[in-house]
Image: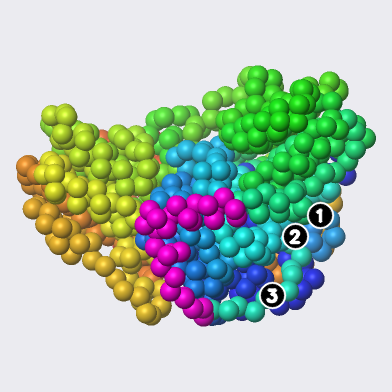
Amino acid sequence: MHKLLTDQPGATMVLLGNEAIARGAIEAGVAVATTYPGTPSSEISLNFFQISQESSLYFEYSTNEKVSLEVAAATANAGVRSMCVMKHVGMNVAADALMTLAYVGVKGGLIILTADDPFMFSSQNEQDNRYYGKLSGLPILEPSSVEEAKNMIPYAFELSESLQEPVIFRTTTRINHSTAPVTLGPIRERVCKGDFAKDPFNYVTVPAVSRKLHVKLLANLEKAAEQTETSPYNFVSGSGSWGIICNGVSYAYITDAVRDLGIHDKVKILRIGFSHPMPQKMIKTFLGSCEKVLVVEEGEPYMEEAIKAFAQEAGLTLPINGKGKDLFSRLYEFNPRLVRQVVAGYFGVSCQVEPIVDLSNVPEIPQRPPNLCAGCSHRATFYAVKKAAEGLATIYPTDIGCYTLGFLPPLGMGDFLICMGSSVGTSCGFSKVTDKKVVSFIGDSTFFHSGIPGLVNAIFNNHNFTFVILDNGITAMTGHQPNPGVDMSLMKLQGYGRISIEAVVRALGVPHISVIQPYKVKKSIEALREAFSFKGVSVVIAQEMCTLYAKGFKKTKSRAYYVSDKCRNHRDCISQLACPAFFLEEEKVKINPTMCDGCAVCAQICPENAILPVKS
Amino acid sequence: MSDITRLIIVAVGGQGNLLASSVLGEAALLAGIPLRMSEIHGMAQRGGVVESALVFGNAQSTIISDGEADVLLGFEPSETLRALNKCNARTVVITNLSPLPPFTVAIGKGVYPDIGELQQIIREKTARLIAMNAVDLAKTAGNVLSVNMVLLGALIQTGILPVTADHVITAIRTKTKAAFVDINTRAFDLGVEAALRQ
C-alpha cells in the first residue's frame, strides 16, 4: 500500500512537503487530481499518480496546465472534490481558464495549487503568484510549514465548498522540498461520481451571463473577506508594541529570529496564511496596537501595499516597512540569518552573528553545472545540427526541458528562450526579420504542451525555419512523467492512447519532414543538411529514448567504449561532445566504463577511429 | 540557539546523500528529536550538486544560512570546499577525500584543487576536520555505493548530533534495502573507526 494511504490517525510520519500536501488531499477525500508536471510541485503529482494505480482516485498528467485546470473545473462543477497542481509559471498557461472559472465558480471543492520558486532554483522566473488571487478574485491560502501544508488542504476544500469558488493554494520551494514529521489525520471517504445539472444561464459565459456572474464573484469575495477575518490561519502571537506581519516560510524565520534575539516580550507577530482577501479588520486592529511594523514576505510587496492602504483608511501613521534599502529585497529567497539581521536592524536591537569563515584564500573551485547525461541522444542531435549548419549564420531558439542544457559550452545550442513552446513561435519572428538560418529545438512533452499552435502558425503564415523535435519518449527534466507521445505499456499501464508526433506534423501539412536516429551521426547530418536547405518550414524528428529512462527496461547494459592506443589526442570527443563519461588521466582521454552508455557517438566522430567497444 | 544543531550535507548527484538524510530523519524520529530538513536537488541526475540542510532541535527554519552550520558533511572534496561559506570558526567539517572531478576540468575550464591544500585550508578556518577516503572504506565494507554509510559513521562518531549510533543503525535497517543492510552497517562502523583515529 502507498504510504500516504496509511489509515492511522494520530501516527507520525516524516514527509516531504509535497508528500504532506498529497496526504492532506487524501485526508480531504480528493477524487480527481490533474497536473502538468513542474518543479517544485512534481512530487505531489507523482504521489497522486502512484496512489491512483491502487485506489479510486482519478489522476491524470494533462497536456498542459490550461487543459489540466479545465478538466478539474468540470469535475468540480460536477460536485467532485478536485485538485489541479502546477508550478508557478503554469498559472500563466492556465490563466485563461482561471479568470472566467472564478466567475462560474464550483460546486465541489477545487484547489488550484501553484508552487512558486523564489531564487529560481529550477525556473525561468520568480513571479509572485499571490497576485493571481487579486487578479481573479479567488481566495489564497499559504502554509508556513510542511505540517501546516497538510492540515491546510482539507481546510482549503471546505473553504472552496463554502464559497463555491476555487481556492488557490500557494507554496514556495522551501515548503515543497522541506521534510518534517507530520501527524496523520483521519481519511474522509472519497466520492468519485458526481452529476452536472444543466444551467446554461449560469455556466455559459456569454456577455449577458458573465455580467451577472461578475456580480456573484464580488459577492463571494465579500464572503471570503469575512472568512479571512476569523480564519485560524490568520493569527496573532506574542505581545509588545513592535509588530511583524509575515507569511509562508518567512514565519519560520521570524519565529526563530524573535527567539534568537530574545525579543519575544517586545514583539507581536501577525501570521497571514489566508492572504487573499487580506484580513482587513484584523490588520487595522493589529496596526492600531503597534508603534512600528515590519512586513516580512518573500517576493513582491503584496502584503505591504495592502497593509499601507489599510493604515491610510484607518488614519494610522505608524511606520510600516518591508521592501527597501537595508530591509528586504524583492529578489530571491530569504534565510534565517538575513531575517534575523533585518529584524534586529529595524527594531534597533543587537544581533550577534557568527562571522562566516574568511574565503579570500580559497582557490577557485571548478564549476559543476548540470550536464546532459552520458549517452543522452540530445547531445548527438546537437552535434549533428552543429555539423550540418557549418558555414551558415544561425539562430537557435530553444525550449524548456533537459535539452535547454545544450546552450552551455561546448555545444552552445540555444540562443533564445522565454517560456514553454517559445522555440517555435520565436522562430517565426526571427526568420522573418533576419537573414540567418533559424533552427529551433523542442522536446516531445513541450511539443504537446504548447508547441503545436506555434507550428500551425508557421505553416499558415508560411515561415521559413527548421524545427527539430527531440523525441526521447518521456518527460525527462521533471523526472520521467508520461506525455501524450509516451508508450504507456512500457510502464505496464493500460487504457491510454498514444499520439505519434510524426503523424501530427504530417497532418498539419509540414512540407518537409524527416525522422532521424541521432546515434547514427552521418545519416543525421545528411538529413539535417537537406532540411536546412529547404525553403519553408522543415521539421526534423530526432527519435531515441531517454537513456536514463531506457535503463529501467534494459536487461543488460550496452557495451561501454574505451579509448585505444590509436588515440592521437585530438580530443574532438571531449571538446565537441562534452560527454560526462570522459575524463583526463595524465593528459590522455579516458572513458569511465560505468558511466558510458555505449551510444557510440564519440566513436563515430573520432578522427583516428580510436574509440572502440570494450571486449566482453 | 544551544539546543539546535545545524548540519549541511553536500554531494554530487548519485552519491547517496538523500538516503543519508533520510536515515538521519528516521534516527531523529527514534530519538524523539525534532528534525526539519530541506533539499535542493535540482538536476541531480545530471551531475549537479545536491545540498541538504538538517536542523535538529526546536527551530522552525528548514534551511541554514551562510556561516551557521555546526557540522558540514561533504561527500566530495571540492564540494566540501565550495560549501565552506556555510561554516564559522566553530564548525566541524567531515569530508570524503576521493575526488569526482567535474566535467569542466576535463574540458579545461577549471583546475581541480590540490587535496592536501584543500584539507589545510579547511583545517585552519574551522574547529576540526575529519577527512577520509570513504570510497576505499566503502569498498572494504563490500560495496562502493556505501560511501554514504561510511560518512554517516564518521558524523555520528563526533557526537555533535543529538542521535546515537544505535538510533542510526536501527534507521539503516529500516531505511536501506535488506540485501545491503550488513554491508551498510559494516560501512557505518568503518566510518566510526576512521573518525576515531583522527
Q: Residue A603 versus residue B159: which sits nearer the camera?
A: B159
| First to last magenta residue range | A193-220
Badge 1 crowding class, 10 Å Cα cut-off, few under 14, some 14 to 19, many 20 or more, is: some
Q: Residue A565 versus residue A75: which sits nearer the camera?
A: A75
Q: Residue A537 versus residue A471: which sits nearer the camera?
A: A537
> Which element is circle 2 on?
strand
Residue at image coords 46%, 64% = A202
Residue at image coords 17%, 29% = A433
The quarter in which the C terminus of chain A is drawn is: bottom left
In the rendered image, the vertical position of residue B70 relative to residue A522, given as above or below:
above
Which labelled disc corresponds to residue A176? none
Badge 3 crowding class, 10 Å Cα cut-off, few under 14, some 14 to 19, many 20 or more, is: some
Give the residue type at disc 1: Pro
Task: Determine which residue is flagged by label 3.
Answer: A187
Task: Determine which residue is flagged by label 2.
Answer: A181
The secondary structure making up most of the magenta span is helix
Q: Are marks 2 and 1 in contact (CB under 8 Å)?
A: yes
Q: Which circle, 2 or 3, is nearer the viewer?
A: 3
Give the residue type at disc 2: Pro
- Find residue A117 and report its image quarter: top right
Q: Are marks 2 and 3 in contact (CB under 8 Å)?
A: no
In terms of sequence position, does the residue under pointer 2 or pointer 3 come before the other?
2
User: x, y percentage for residue B185?
Assistant: 71, 64
Task: Determine which residue is flagged by label 1.
Answer: B34
